[in-house]
């Protein structure tokens, strides 16, 4: 589920290495989407061998975990990740190039502890290689595109479609003034870069200013006659189907930060201080996302899949739908209380669905509030499923927040 590497990494085949005599037996539990991983290849070439009684599952060296290495082994980010990597000028050309971490850690950062796994007798290659390499054959030693290159396309290097173990810490409140260009510090560099940052971006931001620099409506319907991301079945009726313009984007790479957080400007955190912006996520927050439904609809776009997997409030909410585009972002998103490193703080209050006009939350059901209607239905029938705003939450017990959101009738 949500940000759980072992389950969400669809391409990474879980290698259950079982201690049976001398050999390791490879059991694959699912097929990936694009580009075969080493583990898949080995599972294919060797066939699926069933082994007698699985005892203690051993460590899975095909799925790297930062929990093990950062929390467990107390390793610093820079013991593996070098900044900048040698290839930074090659991955982005000329004027868009900036010093970046653009490649996987090198073998040397693992070998001291994993000599055994690197030289394991596993065909066609040891499992551990698949964390970074697509392939390791004498003719092909391609590596995946390092995930920080979200803005880069390189047809020769596939992407690994895995969920991140981290949340990005971006204090919105601290930045709103800076990015608006009103930063009042005597540091000339800061003002310079802030001004430069502004000039490079189109000035089309709505209210409040500047959100659009980093968050745009993804695949809006625009003038197209297709309302949905994929063709719905003819008999769709009132059933849910994903609409265009549902999601807002989130920065895909360091490009959004590097204009200010670079080695010359001296604005902390510098680009090599990974741990200030990337925080390991300990908690798993329940999400309103249904992977089966996503599959039925045929959603494969990695940007959509990733954002959908993060929906913690309303899996069906559409930014481009109804009256939503006309509203200020802060009607629903409370900037001062948002901490992007604490997923729970990003939940959108159900009260905001009422808006100033009482759109989906009204004093009584007669006034047409969807929340009122569904709450009434639920009260009448415990198995009523709320589908107006939800994909899976609507089958769960009614949270107290929903009742509290409905205005109390005024008593005299
Ligand atoms: C022991 C080596 C090692 C250390 C220490 C390490 N990393 Fe990584 N990191 C890797 C490897 C290998 C990958 C690629 C495999 C993967 O994606 O999990 C990776 C991938 C990543 C990714 C992309 C995948 C994801 O889960 O989002 C981020 C972000 C990242 N590292 C940040 C950090 C930060 C921040 C630190 C320090 C707090 C850190 N790393 C420490 C080895 C390391
Ligand atoms: C300081 C020692 C150390 C270093 C350096 C190190 N590891 Fe590990 N790693 C461990 C330990 C300890 C475990 C726990 C399982 C075990 O004992 O093998 C582990 C586990 C793993 C696993 C199994 C899944 C998990 O829990 O993460 C993978 C995959 C892995 N390491 C890959 C790497 C790679 C790739 C690098 C280099 C980028 C690396 N390690 C660097 C000590 C280290
Ligand atoms: C933590 C990520 C990581 C793991 C795990 C890893 N590699 Fe690599 N590998 C790299 C990187 C990065 C380079 C490029 C180093 C450079 O350019 O100096 C590389 C380079 C290579 C090369 C040289 C060819 C080239 O493209 O430059 C071979 C061969 C290779 N790896 C084989 C393996 C094998 C076999 C394994 C498993 C036993 C393995 N690697 C595991 C990251 C990794
Ligand atoms: C300089 C870039 C930048 C600007 C400008 C910016 N944000 Fe963000 N925003 C981010 C980053 C980075 C994250 C965290 C992304 C992540 O979790 O990977 C984020 C996260 C969010 C989230 C949480 C998304 C979620 O996962 O639920 C919301 C909501 C949000 N921003 C709204 C806004 C609003 C409203 C504005 C304008 C007032 C704004 N942002 C301006 C960079 C920006
Ligand atoms: C009518 C309420 C409303 C308005 C107005 C609104 N949002 Fe959202 N936004 C939401 C909801 C609901 C979510 C889903 C949150 C969840 O389920 O985790 C969301 C999610 C997001 C996300 C995470 C990506 C996604 O789509 O799931 C970002 C980023 C974001 N909003 C930015 C913005 C920005 C920027 C604006 C203004 C241009 C804006 N929002 C206006 C309600 C709103
Ligand atoms: C227009 C310039 C600018 C851009 C773009 C920018 N920042 Fe910043 N950032 C600053 C400044 C200036 C500060 C220092 C604020 C202060 O000292 O009060 C800062 C501070 C920070 C801090 C430290 C805040 C704290 O509480 O210690 C973090 C974390 C951070 N930025 C993350 C990011 C991320 C992530 C991005 C990209 C999504 C980004 N910033 C983009 C100018 C920028
Ligand atoms: C100034 C803040 C900042 C610093 C410092 C920073 N990052 Fe990032 N990083 C971001 C933002 C913002 C993104 C894009 C948003 C996202 O991927 O959620 C990102 C994305 C990434 C990704 C892609 C994550 C994914 O799963 O798609 C990797 C990998 C990564 N960073 C690694 C690193 C490493 C390694 C370092 C240290 C050398 C580092 N970052 C330093 C802010 C930062
Ligand atoms: C108008 C939109 C809307 C309607 C209708 C609606 N919800 Fe929600 N629901 C939300 C929002 C926004 C959140 C996130 C804020 C919160 O947790 O209160 C949420 C959160 C939830 C959660 C998660 C609570 C948690 O603690 O994680 C559950 C469960 C839930 N709703 C159930 C229902 C049920 C059952 C109904 C029907 C009686 C319903 N909702 C009707 C908007 C709606």
Image (tube, rainbow, N blue to C red):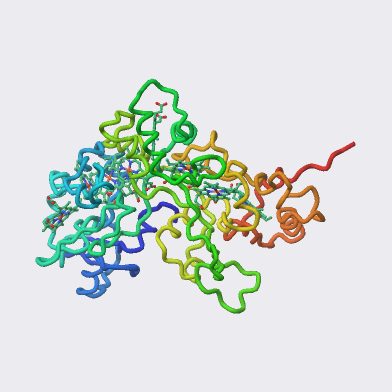
Asked which quadrant contains residue 262, the reply is top left
- Residue 316 in percent (x, y) is at 58, 59
The number of discs equals 0
Please tell me whether residue 54 is drawn above or below residue 331 in the rendered image: below
User: Looking at the rendering, in which quadrant would you find the C terminus?
Assistant: top right
Tell me if 167 is positioned left or right of 237 in this view: left
Tell me if 345 is positioned left or right of 149 in this view: right
Please tell me whether residue 5 is drawn above or below residue 283 in the rendered image: below
Judging depth in this view, the residue of 119 and 9 nearest the camera is 9
Where ligand 3 lies, by quadrant?
A: bottom left
Judging depth in this view, the residue of 123 and 290 nearest the camera is 290
* Residue 69 visible in the current orientation: yes
Task: Give the residue furthest to the right.
Answer: 412
- Residue 254 in percent (x, y) is at 33, 44
Task: Give the residue furthest to the bottom.
Answer: 234
Please tell me whether residue 189 is drawn above or below residue 85 in the rendered image: above
- Residue 105 in percent (x, y) is at 20, 47
Judging depth in this view, the residue of 139 and 291 nearest the camera is 139
Task: Give the residue furthest to the top.
Answer: 186
- Residue 162 in percent (x, y) is at 35, 56
User: Looking at the rendering, in which quadrant would you find the N terminus?
Assistant: bottom left
Q: Residue at x 34, y 59 (%)?
A: 161
* Residue 22 visible in the current orientation: no
Q: Residue at x 33, y 67 (%)?
A: 32
Q: Residue at x 31, y 68 (%)?
A: 34
Please tell me whether residue 177 is drawn above or below residue 309 in the rendered image: above
Tell me if 275 is positioned left or right of 237 in this view: left
Tell me if 101 is positioned left or right of 243 in this view: left
């Amino acid at each position: 589920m949500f940000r759980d590497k072992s389950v969400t990494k669809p391409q990474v085949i879980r290698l259950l290495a079982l201690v049976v005599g001398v050999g390791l037996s490879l059991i694959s539990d699912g097929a990936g989407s694009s580009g075969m991983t080493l583990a898949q290849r080995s599972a294919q070439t060797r066939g699926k061998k069933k082994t007698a009684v699985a005892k203690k599952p051993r460590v899975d060296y095909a799925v790297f975990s930062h929990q093990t290495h950062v929390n467990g082994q107390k390793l610093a980010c820079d013991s593996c990740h070098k900044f900048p990597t040698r290839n930074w000028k090659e991955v982005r050309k000329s004027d868009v190039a900036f010093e970046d971490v653009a490649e996987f850690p090198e073998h040397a950062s693992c070998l001291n502890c994993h000599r055994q796994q690197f030289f394991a007798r596993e065909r066609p290659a040891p499992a551990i290689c698949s964390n970074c390499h697509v392939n390791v054959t004498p003719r092909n030693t391609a590596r995946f595109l390092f995930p920080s290159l979200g803005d880069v396309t390189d047809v020769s290097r596939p992407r690994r479609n895995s969920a991140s173990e981290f949340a990005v810490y971006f204090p919105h409140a601290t930045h709103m003034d800076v990015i608006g260009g009103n930063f009042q510090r005597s540091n000339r560099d800061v003002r310079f870069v802030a001004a430069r940052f502004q000039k490079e971006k189109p000035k089309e931001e709505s209210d409040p200013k500047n959100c659009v620099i980093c968050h745009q409506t993804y695949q809006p319907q625009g003038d197209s006659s297709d309302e949905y991301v994929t063709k719905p079945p003819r008999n769709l009726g009132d059933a849910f189907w994903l609409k265009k313009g549902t999601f807002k984007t989130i920065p895909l790479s360091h490009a959004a930060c590097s204009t200010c957080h670079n080695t010359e400007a001296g604005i902390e955190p510098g680009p090599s201080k990974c741990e200030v912006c990337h925080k390991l996520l300990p908690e798993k927050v329940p999400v309103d996302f249904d992977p089966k439904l996503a599959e039925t609809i045929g959603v494969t776009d990695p940007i959509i899949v990733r954002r959908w997997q993060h929906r913690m409030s309303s899996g069906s909410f559409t930014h481009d739908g109804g009256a939503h585009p006309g509203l200020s972002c802060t009607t629903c998103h409370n900037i001062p209380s948002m901490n992007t490193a604490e997923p729970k703080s990003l939940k959108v209050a159900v009260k905001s669905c009422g808006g100033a006009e009482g759109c989906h939350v009204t004093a009584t059901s007669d006034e047409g509030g969807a929340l009122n209607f569904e709450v009434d239905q639920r009260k009448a029938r415990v198995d009523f499923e709320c589908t107006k705003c939800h994909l899976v939450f609507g089958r769960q017990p009614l949270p107290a927040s929903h009742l509290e959101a409905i205005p109390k009738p005024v008593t005299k």
